[in-house]
Amino acid sequence: MGFDAEGARGMADVCAILAGDTVPPPPEYFDSGSENPGSEPVSKHCMISPDYARAEARHLWRKVWQMACRERAIPEVGDYTVYDILDQSVIVVRTGQQEFSAYHNVCQHRGIRLVTQAGKLGERGQFMCPFHGWCYDRQGKLKALPRAWDFPSLDPAKVALPALKVDCWDGWVFVNFDPDAAPLADYLGDMLPRHFALWPQAERHLVSHAAKIIRCNWKAAFEAFLEVYHVPVTHPTGGQFATDIATKYDEFGSHGRMHLLKFHAPKGVSEQDLVDHWIGMGLAAGKDDIPQVPQGRRARGVLADYQRNQYSRRTGRDFSRFSDAEMLDTLEYFVFPNFAPWGGFGTNLAYRVRPNREDPDSCLFEVMVTAPDPAGEKPADAPPTLLAEGASWMEAPGMSGLGKILDEDVANLERVQQGLHSDGYHTMHFARYQERLIRHLHRTVDAYLAAGES
Ligand code: FES
Ligand SMILES: [Fe+2]
């Protein structure tokens, strides 16, 4: 069967299953991207070339809106954190109840990095440089210049930390290095904010947050989470939850979405096996009272009921109106170029990947696990843990069974990067349907580079 028939069948399968769920999802689940994915091979150059990495640094990372931190990471006025990208460092500070500023993290005297980690502005509300004591307020203005008489050609009123554009979306703070950048709302388009209004991320907290340097190109790491084609082979145990074709891929402008349906049993796997396995892996909302699948029902509906009950018990909220898909499925959104928050109400993740300085062969990969806030509460986010390169993701606090799956994913990546350097390999062959989001990522990065160089 050719692509058009097979791909169309995949999409139709997903939509038919959704429509037949015990509680069908809202219309946003049926939205479709309009891109023609194409099927041409893509040169490996963009994955290994230092020149290409330098061009990305100039024309991509200095132009895009990029997620810098959670609003909740800096909950009080005067709280700040540090966001590093390439060889740049940015301070993000909460300047008001719902106001944030971002500054280049560099003292304007001799250029030292002003702060090295998250913190709180003290009583005086100022950043004090550790070298000679120049002080900046939370608006970035120079407020104290020790021995000012010694700087006759400097007007302290004109000295400030250079600001970056900053804006928020649904609990995430974004920054942009480009002073002429269009607003974040334009960058995101209407699809993502409309979809996430269903499951606000601002009303969730991080239960786990871990990061690790991975010896592969940042795009290779991100791509491992933009397709389900690898699941049956890379995740031989987890692969029981889904068949690779029961996934819908859509592009929304520069961004996209991958909707992986759960519990679409391949041959030989019983509905009860699916339930036992998923709960046993620690991926459900609880571990107790493993439900039995009654005659004539599907694991999908039974587990959705289980999730609704677990979440209601845990948060004190009523989840009965939420659909099976919102309770169970992996609904991964892709915010170009490097951020992937999941939608729905299940055990949700968010990924972020950044190049490791301008090295085309390494990146910093982060995984955040989010959960809905209990009614009336706003728990603090789990602090980030930087794992050693050889460490298992299972060592990250709160990662539980997900760590095993992440280890399986990451185990491929270093070998991918080694293979990309092989003289016997030249072009990447992305599947037209299942790897369309990867192709879309490459196409969009290329467009930024072309625009920057024109
Ligand atoms: S480098 Fe900051 S005060 Fe001198
Ligand atoms: Fe995977």
Image (tube, rainbow, N blue to C red):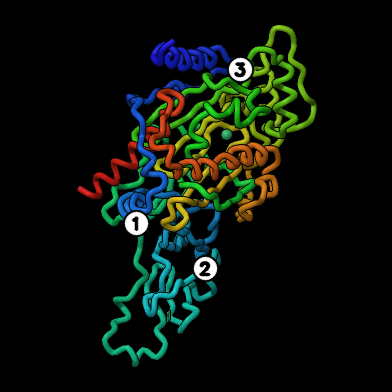
Q: Whereabouts is ligand 2, in terms of quadrant? A: top right
Report x, y in % for residue 127. 47, 73
Residue drawn at x 57%, y 39% as measured from the top left:
412
Residue holding disc 3: 264
Relative to the observer, which residue lies in front, 228 or 66?
228
Residue drawn at x 67%, y 13% as measured from the top left:
298
Q: Residues within 10 Å of mark 1 (few under 14, many from 20)?
A: many
Residue holding disc 2: 116
Report x, y in % for residue 287. 76, 32
Amino acid type, callout 1: Phe
Amino acid type, callout 2: Thr
Relative to the observer, which residue lies in front, 185 or 355?
355
Q: Is residue 143 above or below residue 239?
A: below
Left or right, residue 363 beside residue 107: right
Relative to the observer, which residue lies in front, 411 or 159?
411
Mark 2 element type: loop
Residue drawn at x 58%, y 26% as measured from the top left:
329
Of the numbered discs 1 and 3, the one sitting upstream in the chain is 1
Report if residue 51 is visible in the image. yes
Residue 177, numbered circle: 1
